[in-house]
Image (tube, rainbow, N blue to C red):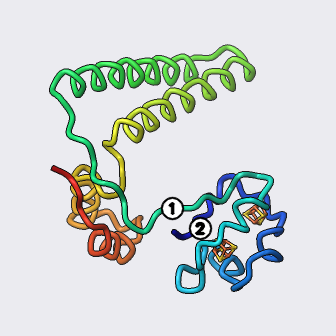
Protein backbone atom coordinates (compact mmCIF):
# COMPACT_ATOMS: atom_id res chain seq x y z
CA UNK A 1 0.00 0.00 0.00
CA UNK A 2 1.03 3.59 -0.61
CA UNK A 3 -0.61 6.89 0.29
CA UNK A 4 -1.83 9.14 -2.50
CA UNK A 5 -2.84 12.78 -2.14
CA UNK A 6 -5.70 14.44 -4.01
CA UNK A 7 -4.51 18.01 -4.39
CA UNK A 8 -8.06 19.19 -5.05
CA UNK A 9 -8.99 18.42 -1.46
CA UNK A 10 -5.72 19.34 0.22
CA UNK A 11 -6.04 22.61 2.13
CA UNK A 12 -2.34 22.66 3.13
CA UNK A 13 -3.10 22.09 6.77
CA UNK A 14 0.14 20.11 6.89
CA UNK A 15 -0.83 17.66 9.66
CA UNK A 16 0.41 14.84 7.44
CA UNK A 17 3.88 16.35 7.47
CA UNK A 18 4.10 15.98 11.23
CA UNK A 19 2.77 12.44 11.56
CA UNK A 20 4.55 10.78 8.63
CA UNK A 21 7.38 8.69 10.11
CA UNK A 22 9.45 8.76 6.91
CA UNK A 23 8.97 12.29 5.56
CA UNK A 24 7.21 10.93 2.46
CA UNK A 25 4.54 13.65 2.51
CA UNK A 26 6.99 16.54 2.46
CA UNK A 27 7.67 16.95 -1.25
CA UNK A 28 8.07 19.89 -3.61
CA UNK A 29 5.43 18.56 -6.01
CA UNK A 30 2.77 18.01 -3.35
CA UNK A 31 2.70 14.31 -4.21
CA UNK A 32 3.69 11.52 -1.86
CA UNK A 33 7.22 10.20 -2.29
CA UNK A 34 6.54 6.53 -3.04
CA UNK A 35 10.16 5.60 -2.39
CA UNK A 36 9.79 6.73 1.21
CA UNK A 37 6.13 5.80 1.92
CA UNK A 38 5.75 2.58 3.94
CA UNK A 39 1.94 2.55 3.78
CA UNK A 40 1.39 2.94 7.52
CA UNK A 41 -1.77 5.04 6.98
CA UNK A 42 -0.97 7.63 9.67
CA UNK A 43 -1.39 10.53 7.26
CA UNK A 44 -4.75 9.18 6.00
CA UNK A 45 -6.13 8.98 9.54
CA UNK A 46 -4.82 12.46 10.38
CA UNK A 47 -5.90 14.46 7.32
CA UNK A 48 -9.15 16.25 8.12
CA UNK A 49 -9.70 17.23 4.48
CA UNK A 50 -9.84 13.59 3.34
CA UNK A 51 -7.18 14.43 0.77
CA UNK A 52 -5.19 11.27 1.42
CA UNK A 53 -6.04 7.65 0.71
CA UNK A 54 -4.16 4.39 0.69
CA UNK A 55 -3.93 2.69 -2.69
CA UNK A 56 -2.94 -0.94 -3.19
CA UNK A 57 0.29 -1.74 -5.00
CA UNK A 58 -1.37 -4.58 -6.87
CA UNK A 59 -4.81 -3.94 -8.26
CA UNK A 60 -7.38 -6.73 -8.25
CA UNK A 61 -8.33 -8.43 -11.47
CA UNK A 62 -11.14 -6.58 -13.14
CA UNK A 63 -14.46 -8.38 -13.36
CA UNK A 64 -15.77 -9.22 -16.82
CA UNK A 65 -18.82 -7.24 -17.91
CA UNK A 66 -21.85 -8.52 -19.76
CA UNK A 67 -23.07 -6.80 -22.92
CA UNK A 68 -26.30 -5.81 -21.09
CA UNK A 69 -24.33 -4.13 -18.33
CA UNK A 70 -22.14 -2.26 -20.83
CA UNK A 71 -25.25 -1.12 -22.72
CA UNK A 72 -26.99 0.22 -19.62
CA UNK A 73 -23.84 2.03 -18.41
CA UNK A 74 -23.42 3.61 -21.83
CA UNK A 75 -27.07 4.66 -21.89
CA UNK A 76 -26.87 6.36 -18.48
CA UNK A 77 -23.57 8.02 -19.47
CA UNK A 78 -25.16 9.26 -22.71
CA UNK A 79 -27.98 10.89 -20.73
CA UNK A 80 -25.50 12.60 -18.41
CA UNK A 81 -23.48 13.90 -21.37
CA UNK A 82 -26.65 15.27 -22.97
CA UNK A 83 -27.64 16.94 -19.70
CA UNK A 84 -24.18 18.49 -19.49
CA UNK A 85 -24.55 19.88 -23.01
CA UNK A 86 -27.97 21.38 -22.15
CA UNK A 87 -26.53 23.08 -19.06
CA UNK A 88 -23.63 24.42 -21.13
CA UNK A 89 -26.03 25.91 -23.69
CA UNK A 90 -28.21 27.43 -20.93
CA UNK A 91 -25.10 28.86 -19.28
CA UNK A 92 -24.05 30.55 -22.50
CA UNK A 93 -27.52 32.12 -22.87
CA UNK A 94 -28.05 32.94 -19.19
CA UNK A 95 -29.85 36.19 -18.35
CA UNK A 96 -28.09 36.80 -15.06
CA UNK A 97 -24.80 36.00 -13.33
CA UNK A 98 -26.64 33.81 -10.80
CA UNK A 99 -28.28 31.77 -13.54
CA UNK A 100 -24.95 31.45 -15.31
CA UNK A 101 -23.27 30.28 -12.11
CA UNK A 102 -26.00 27.74 -11.44
CA UNK A 103 -25.81 26.30 -14.95
CA UNK A 104 -22.03 26.11 -14.73
CA UNK A 105 -22.29 24.22 -11.43
CA UNK A 106 -24.77 21.78 -12.97
CA UNK A 107 -22.60 21.35 -16.06
CA UNK A 108 -19.60 20.40 -13.89
CA UNK A 109 -21.78 18.17 -11.72
CA UNK A 110 -23.00 16.17 -14.73
CA UNK A 111 -19.42 15.83 -15.96
CA UNK A 112 -18.29 14.48 -12.58
CA UNK A 113 -21.24 12.07 -12.48
CA UNK A 114 -20.21 10.66 -15.86
CA UNK A 115 -16.61 10.32 -14.72
CA UNK A 116 -17.72 8.58 -11.50
CA UNK A 117 -19.99 6.28 -13.46
CA UNK A 118 -17.14 5.17 -15.74
CA UNK A 119 -14.75 4.80 -12.83
CA UNK A 120 -17.16 2.79 -10.71
CA UNK A 121 -18.09 0.62 -13.68
CA UNK A 122 -14.40 -0.16 -14.15
CA UNK A 123 -13.87 1.73 -17.38
CA UNK A 124 -11.42 4.11 -15.79
CA UNK A 125 -9.59 1.81 -13.41
CA UNK A 126 -5.84 2.27 -13.74
CA UNK A 127 -5.24 -1.30 -14.84
CA UNK A 128 -8.04 -1.41 -17.40
CA UNK A 129 -7.50 -1.74 -21.12
CA UNK A 130 -9.50 1.47 -21.61
CA UNK A 131 -7.12 3.59 -19.55
CA UNK A 132 -4.12 2.00 -21.27
CA UNK A 133 -5.68 2.77 -24.64
CA UNK A 134 -6.36 6.36 -23.59
CA UNK A 135 -2.76 6.84 -22.38
CA UNK A 136 -1.28 5.34 -25.54
CA UNK A 137 -3.60 7.55 -27.61
CA UNK A 138 -2.33 10.61 -25.73
CA UNK A 139 1.26 9.51 -26.25
CA UNK A 140 0.71 9.20 -29.99
CA UNK A 141 -1.07 12.55 -30.30
CA UNK A 142 0.57 15.84 -31.17
CA UNK A 143 -0.88 17.43 -28.05
CA UNK A 144 2.09 18.73 -26.07
CA UNK A 145 -0.03 20.10 -23.21
CA UNK A 146 0.21 17.02 -21.02
CA UNK A 147 3.28 15.34 -19.51
CA UNK A 148 4.14 12.57 -21.98
CA UNK A 149 7.02 11.29 -19.86
CA UNK A 150 4.58 10.62 -16.99
CA UNK A 151 2.07 8.91 -19.29
CA UNK A 152 4.83 6.67 -20.66
CA UNK A 153 5.88 5.75 -17.13
CA UNK A 154 2.27 4.86 -16.26
CA UNK A 155 1.91 2.66 -19.34
CA UNK A 156 5.10 0.84 -18.35
CA UNK A 157 4.18 0.54 -14.68
CA UNK A 158 0.50 -0.37 -14.76
CA UNK A 159 0.09 -4.05 -15.01
CA UNK A 160 -2.92 -4.87 -17.12
CA UNK A 161 -5.24 -7.23 -15.33
CA UNK A 162 -8.29 -7.79 -17.42
CA UNK A 163 -9.85 -10.91 -18.76
S1 LIG B 1 -2.99 16.82 6.25
FE1 LIG B 1 -4.33 16.69 4.45
S2 LIG B 1 -4.93 18.80 4.03
FE2 LIG B 1 -3.13 18.86 5.35
S3 LIG B 1 -1.39 19.06 3.95
FE3 LIG B 1 -1.68 16.89 4.41
S4 LIG B 1 -2.98 16.17 2.72
FE4 LIG B 1 -3.16 18.39 2.75
S1 LIG C 1 1.19 6.15 4.66
FE1 LIG C 1 2.65 6.49 6.36
S2 LIG C 1 4.66 6.54 5.37
FE2 LIG C 1 3.13 6.81 3.74
S3 LIG C 1 2.94 8.99 3.50
FE3 LIG C 1 1.34 8.36 4.95
S4 LIG C 1 2.28 8.59 6.99
FE4 LIG C 1 3.93 8.66 5.47
Q: Nearer the viewer, residue 131 or 85?
A: 131
Q: Quadrant of ligand 1?
A: bottom right
Badge 2 residue CB within 8 Å of ligand 2? yes
Question: Residue 5: which quarter of the image?
Answer: bottom right
Question: Residue 43: which quarter of the image?
Answer: bottom right
Picture residue at 56% right of the left edge, 32% below the top: 108
Q: Is residue 153 left or right of residue 98?
A: left
Q: Is residue 49 above or below residue 82?
A: below
Q: CA distance from mark 2 to mark 1?
A: 6 Å
Picture residue at 59% right of the left edge, 24% below the top: 106
Q: Is residue 91 left or right of residue 125?
A: right
Q: Nearer the viewer, residue 146 or 121?
A: 121
Q: Is residue 143 left or right of residue 117?
A: left
* Residue 20, image x, y percentages: 74, 77
The residue labelled by disc 2 is 3
Q: Is residue 132 above or below residue 21?
A: above
Circle 2 SS class: strand
Circle 1 SS class: strand
The answer to whether the residues at label 2 and label 1 have Cβ atoms under 8 Å apart is yes
* Residue 57, image x, y percentages: 43, 68
* Residue 136, image x, y percentages: 22, 63
Q: Is residue 55 above or below residue 97?
A: below
The residue labelled by disc 1 is 55
Picture residue at 34% right of the left edge, 55% below the top: 60
Picture residue at 33% right of the left edge, 42% below the top: 122
Amino acid sequence: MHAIRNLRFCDKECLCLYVCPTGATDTESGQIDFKKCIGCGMCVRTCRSHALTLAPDNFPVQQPKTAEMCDSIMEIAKQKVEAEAVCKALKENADSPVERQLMEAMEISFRRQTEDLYREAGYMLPQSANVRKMLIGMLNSNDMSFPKDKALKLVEMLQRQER
